[in-house]
Image (cartoon, rainbow, N blue to C red):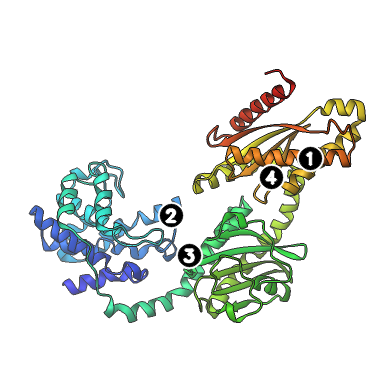
Amino acid sequence: MRKWVELLSIIPELRYPELLGHGYRVAEYTKKVAQAMGVYSEELYYVAFLHDVGKIIIPEMILTKPRHLENEEIAIMKEHPVYSEKLIGRIDALRSYAQWARWHHEYVNGKGYPDGIPSLSLPLEVRILAVCNAYAALTEARPYRKAFTSKEAKNELKKDAGKKWDKEVVDVVAKVLKPIKFDTTEYEDIIRQEKRLYAPIMRLQAIYRIGEEIKSLSDVDNFFRRVLFIIKDVLRIEGKYFLLVPEGNALKVVAQVGANESVVGLKMPPDKGLSTYAYKHRVPVIVNDVTADDRFYPTPGEVVKSEIAIPVIFRNKVVGVIDIESIEKDSFTMYDRQFIEAVAGTIAPVLQAAEVMLRLKELAFTDSLTGAYTFAYLENEFDRLVSTAERDGRKFALVFVDLDSLKRVNDTMGHLYGDKLLQLLVEVFKKNLRKSDFITRYGGDEFIVILWGSEREEAISIIERIKKVFEEESLSRVGGDKDKPHSFSYGVAIFPDQGKKLTKLIKEADSEMYKFKALRKGLL
């Protein structure tokens, strides 16, 4: 019977060969711990072998996803113990014990699944199975993390002893278990065949997922990033994934996965690169050894050995390019090209619509007088700034800028003169800010500048440098008293040190700006 149980447990594991032998490992761990605790039986051994057989119902795109699951995907994954129970229950000798598999994700605190039963009220065999499954999972690599060492895994179990796991069982696991290997040799031919047969299904699932994303489309920028994630889920190629769109005579990056967020917004040189070639010639390009192709445009410091670039065409117009750079040679096949072309065809109408939406967005988010972003743009971008900063452990500076004495200028020199001064201020900031920074008009003569990744000292240094340039430019370009050039006052607030909400940061920077003004007037 053992051989049949092993074969049955292998079926769902073949879909993700890196986990091949998980059922075997859980069974062996469970056997060792159960023997130490005096409750071992063959039935427990076989149920442990088959505890995850219900994963045969889980879609490939969820089972092998290389990042954390969405809520809907988690709900699907949580169904697998129910189906494990149903399948094991079809085996006469194990029918009475099938519920053990159903409960292998229940916790001591009652917050497990599928039933939410406090596991201390369940048989000891179930509690042993639950902890041994957790130990096995921790010591195995997952698409979204590396494997824990045995010591690290045991420490993780100890952290949750009494919350998730039976403390007594955790103590025994810590004493008697160490990771074991599973010989995959006899299954290698099956794995190769399975991958070949399952690839078209995976790709159909990807197209379906993209279609579902389009149905609920609300954030275009995030949609394109999710599309790149889906492509990476399917191809499983290590490297950088980009979506580029035409801007003028060049291509601009609008989404990325695997690269630095700062590349979004960057333009490719108009006459260089495989993506540019694919765009201009309207043809797919696959180069599996970039060192042998003169069209390849290397990025300093980046390791790229093969690249694929697929044009996105809508109504006979190239509206974008999907570009993937791999760190390995010979990464791309004809089937990869066909899949990416299918994705390109699916997203082409969205990309075309996004171009129109972008123009409307630019109108709504650009101040008509100065060319600075509007405050609405900052409100729209702020959540993205915060999430990126928290994810990367970065800070940013919010600088409140007030053009000095604009009312007096308007009253004495006229509003046209004042308008030119506001325009010059924004022009100077735009020329001297980094690509990751931007300026918005808060209202009237007040502006807010975002300096990405800047601490207070760096922010002050940047603003002081720009202030000096503005003062010099104001004399030469709009006139005025040479002894009293036009200038501005400012205050700085740092995220997250002085606040995490936009209103709080503005209040802090505004308050500092008034202190700055008072100091200059000799009031403090």
Earlier sequence position, callout 3 versus callout 4: 3
Earlier sequence position, callout 1 versus callout 3: 3
Name the residue rendered at 15%, 50% in the picture. Answer: 124
Earlier sequence position, callout 2 versus callout 3: 2
Crowding at dot 2, Cα within 10 Å, few <14 / some 14-19 / many 20+, comes out as few
Q: Are marks 1 and 4 in contact (CB under 8 Å)?
A: no
Q: Are marks 1 and 2 in contact (CB under 8 Å)?
A: no
**In this figure, which residue is indicated by the disc labeled 1?**
470
- Separation (CA) of disc 2 from disc 4: 32 Å
Crowding at dot 1, Cα within 10 Å, few <14 / some 14-19 / many 20+, comes out as many
**In this figure, which residue is indicated by the disc labeled 2?**
68
Under circle 2, the secondary element is: loop
- Separation (CA) of disc 1 from disc 2: 48 Å
Q: Amino acid at mark 1?
A: Phe
431 or 83: nearer the viewer: 431
**In this figure, which residue is indicated by the disc labeled 3?**
233
